[in-house]
Amino acid sequence: MFKHIVEVFVGVVVIMIFFMFKLLGKKNSSTLCAFIFYKIGKHSKFNRIAKKNISLVWPKKNTEDVNKIIKGMWRNIGRNFGEFIHLKKYNPINCTNTKIVGLENIKKIIAYNNKKKKGIIFFSAHYGNWEIGPLVLKSLQLDPLCLYRRANNKFVDFIIQKIRSAYGTYAPKGDLGAKKSFIWLRKGNCLALLMDQKLNEGPMINFLGKPAPTANFIADLALKMNLDIVPIQLSRVNKFDNNIKFFNKIVIPKGNLSHNKKVKIVLKEINSVISDWIKNNPEQWLWIHRRWNKNLY
């Protein structure tokens, strides 16, 4: 009973915060949250995890450089939180603060798959403002199904999904999400995934120089249903601007290789793409997950 009351109270507080952000406007709430998240985040246990992760990837980085990455990370997370309530008004195609790279190529891929009545799998990472991914796909006349991890507080989860429902269809990870993904793709719709999440199982695939459990769901679907996999990089530029880049399709292996071998080849390429994004601009990635083997922590 007490836990239920606490969850309701937290949910009410979240509603009040989002209402305040709506009154403040996008830029003001983004700036305020960037400041607050850094000031609080740097004293949290997640800050220690971030430092550990960075030291695992770059053991020779000096303290000043590590702190710069972490400061940028907290500010980016804060901006994402502050901008969240304003996203339903965001149209990346017509936004002067957004640059899209690879637009003509992705339109050709979409047209080809529409003609074949086939779905497409898009993936990104917790990088830049990852929440804008579904809006980008919506602006291309696609209907994305996005898989997400449920919030621990069911009332907060309801609030978040209520806001998200304005620009995408969401399904929780697990059996329900897997079944819905299959049906969704069979209808010729697209699936949107974040491929850098912390996992406790899955094949061990190199990620930022170290083996990490990696979800094989995306590769299994693509191989079994003969689907294209397209990476989307969602970068934040100059605080309030976004740079959206559609990369070339992931190469799907052919030939007499076993299914498991093909899955690992696909996952290796996916992790390599995300690793390159992070290495080029580490401040934009979410460093606070224990992404690698538990023994390293």
Image: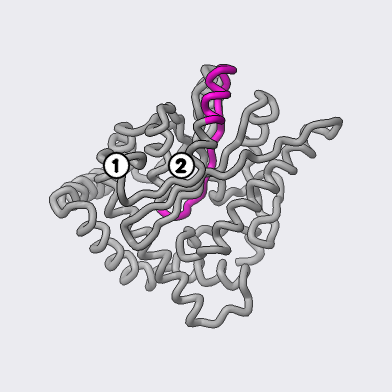
Could you say where residue 104 lies in the image, as x and y percent from the top left? 50, 36
Give residue 149's mark: 2
Amino acid type assigned to the residue bearing label 1 in the image: Tyr
Q: Give the left or right position of residue 186, taking residue 134 as reference.
A: right
Could you say where residue 46 lies in the image, as x and y percent from the top left? 45, 65
Q: Quadrant of the N terminus?
A: top left
Q: Residue at x 65, y 56 (%)?
A: 207
Could you say where residue 137 lies in the image, as x and y percent from the top left? 43, 35
The residue that label 1 is drawn on is 90
Amino acid type assigned to the residue bearing label 2 in the image: Arg
Dot 1 falls on a residue whose secondary structure is loop
Residue closer to the observer: 249 or 174: 249
Magenta part of the chain: 108-128
Residue closer to the observer: 292 or 101: 101
Q: Tag 1: Cα neighbours inside 10 Å, few (<14), some, or many (≥20)?
A: some
Depth check, mark 1 against mark 2: the one in front is 1
Could you say where residue 202 lies in the image, as x and y percent from the top left? 67, 44
The part of the image, by quadrant, that contains residue 70 is bottom left
How far apart marks 1 and 2 lie (CA) works out to 23 Å
Q: Is residue 292 magenta?
A: no
